[in-house]
């Protein structure tokens, strides 16, 4: 019963929290396999009709897992220019390290850089560390709780994006 109550409280806090723009928890690859997992991709489009359009994209979602350590690396870049106007230019990078101390306790450290003109973020830097507790693990469900000390620096986009 305490696991159900704890899960309900965590879900409630998560749904009412507005601080995190990107949910990195949803990006974890659920696998028991050690080694490298993930994908890397790029895209490029150049088109010239009535207007000239350039679209560039790059993405990486890579995880390395050993018996005690887990590294999660996320990168996303998008650039869109049309008719001599930059319509979209955003970048996101996240690196997370997780070290298994024992069966129920891990220690995590993370860093993140983000730029997103559409969301009004000129520059956002994060860095943090803290414990992560395994509360429940079964064949179909995994429940963790974590707390972290985090430093955040943010510059807002002050001028409208043209």
Image (cartoon, rainbow, N blue to C red):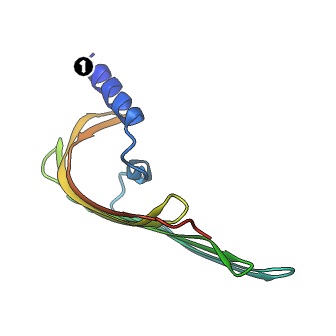
In the structure shown, which secondary structural element does the residue marked by tag 1 occupy? helix
- The reply, left or right, for residue 121 in relation to residue 66 is right
Quadrant showing the N terminus: top left
Image quarter hosting the C terminus: bottom right
Compared across the picture, whether 160 is left or right of 46 comes to left
Q: Residue at x 51, y 67 (%)?
A: 159
Residue 44: percent from left, percent from top: 66, 79
Please say if 14 is above or below 78: above
Q: Quadrant of residue 11?
A: top left
Q: Decide if residue 64 is in sight here.
A: no
Q: Quadrant of residue 96?
A: bottom left
Per the image, the residue denoted by label 1 is 2
| Residue in front for this viewpoint, 105 or 57 | 57
Q: Residue furthest left?
A: 101
Q: Residue at x 13, y 47 (%)?
A: 102
**Residue 47 versus residue 61 in the image, above or below:** below
* 90, 60: nearer the viewer: 90
Q: Is residue 121 above or below residue 1?
A: below
Q: Position of residue 139 (x, y in %)?
A: 38, 35
Residue 59 visible? The answer is yes
- Image spot of residue 114 (x, y percent): 41, 65
């Amino acid at each position: 019963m305490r696991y159900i109550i704890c899960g309900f409280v965590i879900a409630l806090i998560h749904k009412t929290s507005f601080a995190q723009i990107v949910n990195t928890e949803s990006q974890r690859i659920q696998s028991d396999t050690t080694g490298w997992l993930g994908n890397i991709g790029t895209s490029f489009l150049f088109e010239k009709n009535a207007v000239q359009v350039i679209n560039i994209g790059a993405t990486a979602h890579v995880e390395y897992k050993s018996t005690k350590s887990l590294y999660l690396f996320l990168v996303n870049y998008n650039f869109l220019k049309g008719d001599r106007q930059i319509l979209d230019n955003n970048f996101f990078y996240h690196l997370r390290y997780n070290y298994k101390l024992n069966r129920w306790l891990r220690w995590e450290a993370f860093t993140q850089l983000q730029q997103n003109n559409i969301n009004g973020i000129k520059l956002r830097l994060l860095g943090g560390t803290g414990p992560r507790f395994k509360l429940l693990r079964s064949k179909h469900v995994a429940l963790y709780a974590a707390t972290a000390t985090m430093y955040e620096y943010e510059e807002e986009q002050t001028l409208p994006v043209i």
